[in-house]
Every structure is written in structure tokens, then in C-alpha cells.
Amino acid sequence: MVDDDDKNEYSDEYQFSDLDVISPDTNEETTSSDAVKKESNTNIRRNALVAVIVIIIAMLAYKFLGPLFTKKPQSADTVPSLATTSTSQPATLAPQQPQVQTVTPSELPPPVETTPPVTQPTPTVDTTEITQRLSALEVNQQNLRSEMDSLNSQLATINTNLNALATKIAQLNQTLTVIVTRVEEQSKEISVLTIRTKPKPVRKVVIKAPPPPSYFIQAIIPGRAWLIAQNGSTITVREGTQVAGYGVIKLIDSRQGRVLTSSGRVIRFSQQDS
């Protein structure tokens, strides 16, 4: 009998301890749920404040950095879920085998409400403007490169043209020097030839013409006269007759015995006739 009483006593203690473990007091449940709700509310407010501060900082950084702004990796601050802790009371078991009792679902404690993790809103950056600027910069760089290439090609062509002109000028100088030397040689040859072909001074031979014959009156009548030269030749003259060395007969004066000529010479009788 004593053993039976001891068994019943141990079984009753085990049953009470199991009930304490399975169904805690309602007061403890209400206090724990209130504390969890307050803590979750404070966590939500804190996370919202942190999100607002992060958004403001991101906007300021985008404003100041401009196109150099690089998108930072998104970081989501999650609120760790609150794990419900239940206080379990250790059960003192009797050395005898405990009686297994089935617990109905109505006796289970109500589930503790867990707040879902609050994700921090990441700042959205409008990358269209940045891409437009980058594309514009790339286009400008390509245009500059093309212009530089064209300028380099133009400079190369100008250099080639200058080199060609320099070579042509050198060739012209060479030809000019050759021409000058040839002209000098030809001038020397011409001077030599002019000296050789210079006509010798010709002595003028003066041939004295024989003096005109002197005429004398042989006979004279009015309007006509007969003249005789020193060599014995005779001529008959009238007024207007041409006589060599005397000119034209102007007047035949039979009274004075003279013949006047255009040259001013007067033909008279010879001294032998007088």
C-alpha cells in the first residue's frame, strides 16, 4: 500500500510539472506578446528613419558627383525575427517509469506573432541621363578622333607636297646652273668668233678723176659758138647746152667774145688766138 501511494504521489507531481511546461500562465503570455509588439514597433520606426537618412544621403551624393556617380550595391537591412522564448520548468521525474499523458490541441499555448522582416528601400538612381551623357561624350570623342585623323592626313599630304616642291626646286636650280654655265661658254665662244671674224680695215683707194677739159672759143656768132679743148676736140654749143665741167651755157656774147655758163666760169678765146 505504501508503494502504491508513493507511485500515485510521483505520478501526480509529474502531471503537474507537465502541465506547467505545456500550458504557462496567461499573464506571462500577454506580457510577452506586448513586449514583442512594442519592440517590433520600435524596430519599424528605427528602420524607417534609417531608410529616410540613406535616401537623403544618396540624393546628395548623386547631386554632387553627377555623371561620376556609381551605383552602390544595394544593402537591405532586415530586422531579425524575434524568436519566442518559452520558459521551461525542469521536471523532477521519479525513478519509476512515468505515465505518458496525451495532450489535446486545446491545451497548447497560442502561437506567438512574429513580425515579417522589414526591407530597407534602396535609393533608385535614374541612369538614363548618365547613359545619355556617356553616349554624347563617346560621340564627341569619336568626332574628335575623326577630325584628328583627317588633320593628320592633310598634314601628311602637305608634307609630301612640300617635299615634292623641294625636289622640283632643286632640279630647277640644277638646270639653271647648267644653263648659266652653257650661256657663259657660248658667250666666250661668241667673243672668240667675233674677234676672229672681225673684218680687217680696208684702205680706201682714192682714184683721182681726171680734171675736166678746158675749152676755148674757136669761133662765135650770135646764138652759137664753137669750142675747142686742149686735146684738140671741138664741140658746138648753143644757149642751154650742157658742157662737162662748166654746166649749162647761159649766154653767148659774140660782141665781147665770151660764153657765160651756169657754173660761173667764162669761156674765152685762147691766148694764142689773141
Image (spheres, rainbow, N blue to C red):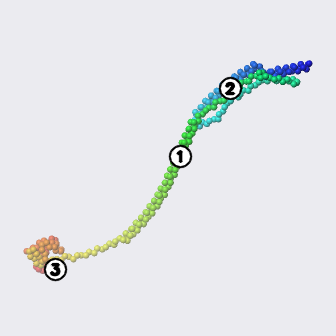
Question: How far across and how far down the image is residue 126, in percent?
Answer: 58, 34
How many C-alpha atoms fall within 10 Å of the one at disc 3: few (<14), some, or many (≥20)?
few
The amino acid on which the numbered mark 3 sits, given as a three-letter code, is: Ser
Nearer to us in this view, 274 or 181: 181
Q: In the image, which is nearer the foreground, mark 3 or mark 1? A: 1
Secondary element at image label 2: helix
Q: CB under 8 Å between callouts 2 and 1?
A: no
Q: Quadrant of the N terminus?
A: top right
Q: Is residue 250 left or right of residue 78?
A: left
Residue beneath disc 1: 146
Residue 213, numbered circle = none
Q: CB under 8 Å between callouts 3 and 1?
A: no
The answer to whether residue 87 is above or below residue 192 is above
Which residue appears at 8% of the width and 74% of the height?
A: 222
Secondary element at image label 1: helix
The amino acid on which the numbered mark 2 sits, given as a three-letter code, is: Asn
Residue 187 visible, this orientation: yes
Q: How many marks?
A: 3
Residue 217 visible, this orientation: no
Q: Quadrant of the C terminus?
A: bottom left
Residue beneath disc 3: 233
**CA distance separating discs 3 and 1:** 120 Å
Question: How far across and how far down the image is residue 260, in percent?
Answer: 13, 72
Residue beneath disc 2: 43
**The quarter of the displayed image where residue 117 is located:** top right
Tell me which numbered mark, 2 or 3, is placed earlier along the sequence: 2
Which residue appears at 16% of the width and 80% of the height?
A: 233
